[in-house]
Amino acid sequence: MIMNKPSSQINWKMVLKWGGTIISFILLVWLLTKLDWQKSWEILKNMPVYSYGLALLLMLLGQFLNSVRWYVLLRAQDVHISIGETFKIFISGVFASNFLPSTIGGDTLRFLAIARITKDRPLGLASVVLDRLVNLAASCTLIPFSVSVLRTTGLHINSDLYTMAGLTIFNGKVGQWFTRVFNKYKDLLIRWLDKPVSLLVAFLIAWSSSVIILSAVWVLSQGIGIQVSLWQVLGANTISYFITLLPISISGYGLREITVTSLYTLMGATLEQATALALITRIISTIVTVPGVIWLQQIIHKNEEAS
């Protein structure tokens, strides 16, 4: 009698994510040990109170517009849902993404919530996927600002680098992922091709929300005393956004702070200023999603009743 040994397969993706997160945190802690804490406290103490309030309002407005983007895509498919309900589901998903191993956690919550409303699970899933793709497309339009920032830091970019980056994207993992997603959901995604106006409106909203949220970062940078323009903030934070999309960290924790601190230091900020900006931005963006914890419980309860 031959016994089959159970095969234990290592989930290398999770190993990479946890490993990257741990390394990022170690680097972040090391960075914090290099800070002059007295100087950091002076920066926070002298920061105008209105900077915090205005940044909070701008980030809240940006997240609301993100939910409106998804609402536009849903309404294009005759999904009967209000803007308020869409915002509750969306912000609950963002809150979940802040505390679950990946953004997939938040997307799964959105999918389950909208599937309960539409009774059409494929349509609900496609709406979440398309919402992600529209946001990604809008973020790509900010890349020229990122190139400008990289040039100011001393990195010379030529056409060969653009060509190499393009080949890497379309022939590498990113291109394979995009092709796989499109082939899997193309029969669903083409539903929106009959509603091109909704796609255009969703794209414009995505672009506007990105600029508004990054304007909040610019407000904080000015309050801290970092002399950068709004366009530099757009470029630097777009770089950090794409870096945190790499599957080497859980929700970008640590990795985003290291990236932001490095970029702003290269743009002339002190280590204390750049670190303060990275941490304050993370805290405020998390505070904005706190109401999601209340709505999250309601959504889970409704899903349990429907199942």
Image (tube, rainbow, N blue to C red):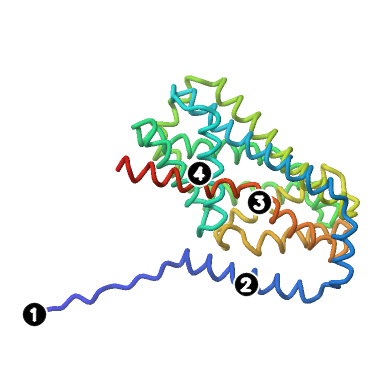
In the image, what residue type sits under mark 3?
Answer: Ile
Reading the chain from its start, which is encountered first: label 3 or label 1? 1
> On the picture, is 2 further left or further right than 234?
left
In the image, what residue type sits under mark 4?
Answer: Trp
In the image, what residue type sits under mark 1?
Answer: Met
State the residue position of label 2: 23
Reading the chain from its start, which is encountered first: label 1 or label 2? 1
Q: Is residue 200 above or below residue 59?
A: above
Of tags 4 and 1, the one toward the viewer is: 4
The percent coordinates of residue 110 (x first, y second) are: 46, 42
Is the C-beta separation of discs 4 and 1 under 8 Å? no
State the residue position of label 4: 295
Of tags 3 and 1, the one toward the viewer is: 3
Q: Which mark is residue 1?
A: 1
Reading the chain from its start, which is encountered first: label 4 or label 1? 1
Residue at x 65%, y 70% (from the top left corner): 25
Disc 1 to disc 2, C-alpha distance? 47 Å
Label 3: which secondary element: helix
